[in-house]
Amino acid sequence: MNDFFACWKDPKNPFQSSSQLPIDYPILGKHLYSLAKSLNFSVMDACWFFGITNASWYEYSTNHYPKMEERHARELRKLFDESIRDGDFDSRVKRLNSKIQDEIESFREKEKKASRHPNKPINDISLSLLCRFFSVMPDWSSCITMKSPDIKKLDLLFKEAFKHIPDQAKAHSTCLEPCIGALLGRDKNAGYRWIQGVNQPHSTVKRLAHALIQWLSYESAGDICSAEISSEERTKRAYWWLALSQNEHKLLNREWGNGIQRG
């Protein structure tokens, strides 16, 4: 990964030091399933938390090949048992193998066209960022509520933090504009629409915004009454996040501020 900031390689940076999700490779559909499992989420919980539909969850999390192999094995055992009684085993096996091969080829063609799959990158920067955040800081999941997040507050937190970024760090960044829409994985004008009430953020963005507001305000999850972080710590966290967001855009071949243009 490009070194956007000198402190990106700070060992305290939770995103850089995590070995769970390689920072130089996109988030895959199967990572959502792994994260949901680690957080002890039901399917319903996972869909709400990630802001996706049941159908999307099924596509991201379901690998059809093991079930297909089990069904083919059952069919082969059944064929063998029947052939013991009436012979003609070789021709039956040949027909079954041909049927299995046709089914596998048909399924592979469908996989190529599918936008969501356990082994394909998630083509949603907001969802990828959400997954990265909670894979390294699962305790912050307790910050997520049903209420709409205060996007204006989050925007101000980033703007205040970016005032203190040193010149040497600015030289490593492709863009230090505190663009709240892009920081949350959407298009660069999304923040304006949210703050002005033109439209509401997408559910995925809401979960991410809730977490970031708390993370840029308090020392740790659950200490929201007494442990506010210093401005220096906020600045450090803010450009860790900026570097992560820029990197996620790059991994999905998107220009900064050119995320999904909805919600």
Image: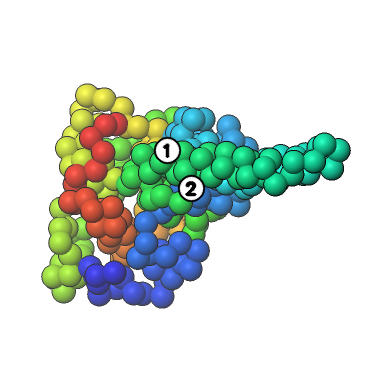
Where residue 30 appears, as percent x and y from the top left, is 50, 50
Q: Residue 101 carries which label?
A: none
Give the image quarter of residue 12: bottom left
* Depth check, front residue: 90 or 257: 90
Point 34% across, 36% down: residue: 150
- Label 2 or label 1, whichever lies nearer to me, is 1
- Mark 2 vs mark 1, CA separation in Å: 14 Å
Which class describes the residues within 10 Å of circle 2: few (<14), some (14-19), or many (20+)?
many
Q: In which quarter of the image is the N terminus?
A: bottom left
From the image, tell me which residue sits under label 2.
Answer: 118
190 to the left or right of 233: left
Q: Which amino acid does label 1 sit on?
A: Lys
Q: Quadrant of the C terminus?
A: top left
The answer to whether residue 211 shows anywhere in this view is no
83 to the left or right of 47: right
Which class describes the residues within 10 Å of circle 1: few (<14), some (14-19), or many (20+)?
few
From the image, tell me which residue sits under label 1.
Answer: 110
Identify the element where label 2 is drawn. loop
Point 56% across, 51% down: residue: 34
| Label 2 close to label 1 by CB (< 8 Å) | no
Point 78% across, 44% down: residue: 80
Q: Which amino acid does label 2 sit on?
A: Pro
* Depth check, front residue: 138 or 250: 250
Where residue 76 appears, as percent x and y from the top left, is 72, 44
The answer to whether residue 174 shows anywhere in this view is yes
Where residue 156 appears, as percent x and y from the top left, is 25, 46
166 to the left or right of 183: left
* Depth check, front residue: 96 or 179: 96
Give the image quarter of residue 91: top right
Where residue 112 appears, as percent x and y from the top left, is 38, 44
